[in-house]
Image (tube, grey):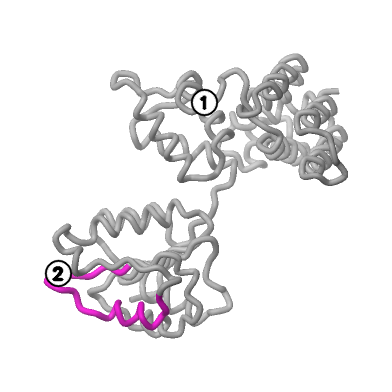
Amino acid sequence: MAEAKNVSFEGIMRDLEAGKFAPVYYLMGDEPYYIDKIADYIAEHALQPEERDFNQTILFGSDVNASQIADLARRYPMMAERQVVIVKEAQNIKNTDALERYFSQPMASTILVMCHKNGKVDGRKTAYVKAIKSAGVMYESAKLRDRDLPAFIEKYLQARQVKIDNKSVQMIAENIGADLSRLVGELDKVILSLPADNRVVTPQTVEDQIGVSKEFNGFELRDAIVRRDVYKANQIIKYFDENPKAGSIYSFLPLLFNYFQNLMIAFYAPNNKSQEAVAEWLELRNAWGAKDYMTGMRNYSGMKVMGIISKIREIDAKSKGLDNPNTPAGELMKELIFYILH
């Protein structure tokens, strides 16, 4: 088999859904969601239900070594076209010499799936990497960046014929974060709650199903800060102080840091008077995504933004106990918001 090119999750899934299976799948990376989706699809579709008892094996890297995996992969299927061997926690396999030899000559009748989570193959093992790629598919499942979460949410819902507005997208992204398994679980819960004749997610839906207040949430706090709305920002902070489960400094600091960091970058855009140019400079998906940065540049000077970024770092350190023996998180948040808005 020719050496595999860079592959995407969508590309792998298209081939699998078309019944095109490779002899080897080496799935690695820090985002387990995509690794599990690929491995689960192979487990459910590569064999007929009646073939699985004798031809599907699931192993754990901490329980077997490379030689045992290679020997099992060389076994012929029993009364079936192929066999499937899935190795979970493949990162625990230390000596990979036997696997490297197997990858050099994989069995055409075996689908070997290696699930290597929380990391990737040591790039210095060039012969091992080359052997994997020559055998089949090598895929790295990287963690989504926070700025990519809205696109993921929209795409996931769109594929299920569900519409969502921008505010609801931001509420979900900021409340759930980049844990895709949890995020998908919450989205599925939201989808199930929708009536058949109204497949639209609104802020009220998010509040009812996920428990994020449509008036007092990270999206609204960020919006109030962008607009420099002192009254609204302090209302939200007061709400969080009285309802700790609704939000905390630990979730808002990254949100505010990312905004002001990007705002600082926006000041250096070659044409920072154009919303389209700023969106392109910040590598945003579309021009409306730059609206908040245009507002921010009107309401904050570059020097003020530099000071805010420094203050956020200071508050972050204090929230972790550095040079701060007693100040509670709520007071630290009030200190930060006062500094930003005044």
Give the position of the N terminus as an image quadrant. Answer: bottom left
Boundaries of the magenta span: 64-85
Front-lying residue, 125 or 303 = 125
The location of residue 315, given as percent across then percent down, is 81, 38
Sooner in the amino-acid sequence: mark 2 or mark 1: 2
- Which residue is identified by label 1? 211
| In the rendered image, the vertical position of residue 161 relative to residue 321, given as above or below | above
Is label 2 or label 1 in front?
A: 1
In the picture, the disc for residue 80 is 2
Amino acid, disc 1: Gly
Left or right, 29 with reference to 334: left
Q: Residue furthest front?
A: 326
The location of residue 167, given as percent across then percent down, is 55, 24
Mark 2 is surrounded, within 10 Å at the Cα level, by few (under 14), some (14 to 19) or many (20 or more) other residues, namely some
Left or right, 155 with reference to 46: right
Q: Residue at x 26, y 73 (%)?
A: 110
Q: Is residue 314 magenta?
A: no
Left or right, 95 with reference to 73: right
Mark 1 is surrounded, within 10 Å at the Cα level, by few (under 14), some (14 to 19) or many (20 or more) other residues, namely some
Q: Is residue 74 magenta?
A: yes
Res 131 → quadrant: bottom left
Amino acid, disc 2: Ala
Whether residue 193 is visible: yes
Q: Residue at x 79, y 26 (%)?
A: 334
Front-lying residue, 38 or 283 = 38
